Image (cartoon, grey):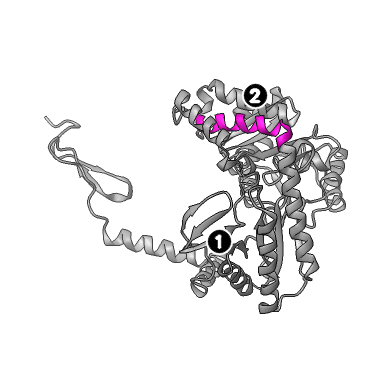
Amino acid sequence: MSTEFDSHESNEMAGGATWTTSPNSEQLPRAVEPRQKQAIERLKERLEEDRVTRIALNFLDKFMGVHLKDGVIDWMDGRRMGMVGQEVVNFGSDSFLGLDRDPRVQAAIIEGMNEWGTHNGSSRAFGNIELCEEAERRLARWMGVEDTLIYPSVTLANIGLLPGLAGKRDLLVLDRKSHDSLQQSALIAAGNGAKVVYLDPCTGDSLAKVLRAEEYDGCVVVVDGIYSMTGEIPPLNDLDQVTRAHGGILYVDDAHGTALVGPKGRGAASLKLDSIDNALVVGSLSKAFSCMGAFVTCDSRLKRILKIRSSTFVFGGPVPPPYLAGICKVCDILESPEHDEMLRRLRQMVKQLTDGIRAMGLTACGGEAAIVGVTIGDIEQTFKAGKALFDRGYYVQSATYPAVPIMSGLLRIQVNANHTPENITGLLEALAALKSEFGLVKR
């Protein structure tokens, strides 16, 4: 009699490959048929027809060896790195406080691994480890809020939070210039029934106009705390006042302001708002924290709800225990006078950089945190300018479309606490030579 373990029974695998259930066979999938290969080729062709993909691939091919996007880093310390055979000062790192090399943070991470292992092995929907609870308490104390909820990254926080906060009959108002993770999160929320309206320009007046015209049960206004490419801060206080007046809440992705601006480094929202009691603030635990993860400010009641409604919390993995231990150690540093001194030095260097750029007649964006953008404009010029700086010993990021509008390319400079005033002086000298070589003008 034949059974499900018959030695010649055929079973279909994903993609149409088959294997047999012979107890003596290795049960390996058969080769993919030509028809399936053709389908994969058609898929690639369709994807390459997308406008953004087509433009990006064209420039990557055209400026091979200039754009540095595929450059391999051989080594790095807190200030310098080796890349494609050249030693350069690294102005592309977002480890803004330089804590990735701090021996106290490294020791805490090792201690966390020794005590808890490398991974706690389960979604937090099924339970939690005490170290995560402690990290959330420490973050809440530092931020001056009742509670926080930790996610594995800012992107996963946004993707889980926005669809969980806004559904049918709710309104999401999204700054058109906000981070891509917020844009993608809004699309998911729209698929769940929320209405999404884009704000452009991002001003209090334009927000008031939108909110007066819309009907909604709940409203969430979504904005970056600091724009990731330019380092600029949107008019958060105006947005907050209008949002409050119309019964909504303000959602601030403060990834690039966490631990850098505002009282005690609590971020751009704390810097610009009278109070964050009507805001949900998402902070990064990588970047300035030099660990891994993200958090959102909340109270205990909302935290309980978010644990149910946030898909990436329920169905995603947790932050590994070693990084939770590192986060607690960073909180020690942020609550000490040492943090004030770090920020003082960092702000001095950022001011030195922005003042120097403007003095030579170029446009310097941002500067309130640790990101400074030098506007170039043309995509080709932006790539070539970045490579010219690299050849002079300084790595910055050439930001082009779609990260910025199509003819608004810029050099994205990230200053960190491990840099020195001499590093800034050298970069300014290289930029001055670049200005002369490329005929750069103020934009």
Numbered disc 2: secondary structure: helix
**Crowdedness of circle 2 by 10 Å Cα count: few (<14), some, many (20+)?**
few
Q: Horizontally, is 57 left or right of 340 in the view?
A: left
Q: Which residue is mark 2?
A: 304
Q: Which corner quadrant holds the N terminus?
A: top left
> Callout 1, which amino acid?
Val
Quick check: is 331 in the magenta stretch?
Answer: yes
Foreground of the two, 77 or 33:
77
Q: Which corner quadrant holds the C terminus?
A: bottom right
Numbered disc 1: secondary structure: strand
Please provide percent x and percent y for residue 128: 53, 23
Which residue is pictured at 69% across the width and 71% down the height? 377
Please provide percent x and percent y for residue 348: 76, 51
Disc 2/disc 1 C-alpha distance (Å): 47 Å
Foreground of the two, 291 or 3:
291
Count of labels in the image: 2
Q: Which residue is mark 1?
A: 88
Span of residues in magenta: 319-338
Q: Quadrant of residue 88?
A: bottom right
> Callout 2, which amino acid?
Arg
Q: Main secondary structure of the magenta part?
A: helix
Q: Is residue 178 visible?
A: yes
Which residue is pictured at 71% across the width and 67% down the height? 375
Q: Horizontally, is 116 left or right of 244 in the view?
A: left
For residue 440, above or below residue 52: below
**Crowdedness of circle 1 by 10 Å Cα count: few (<14), some, many (20+)?**
many
Foreground of the two, 86 or 14:
86
For residue 309, above or below residue 94: above
Q: Quadrant of residue 158?
A: top right
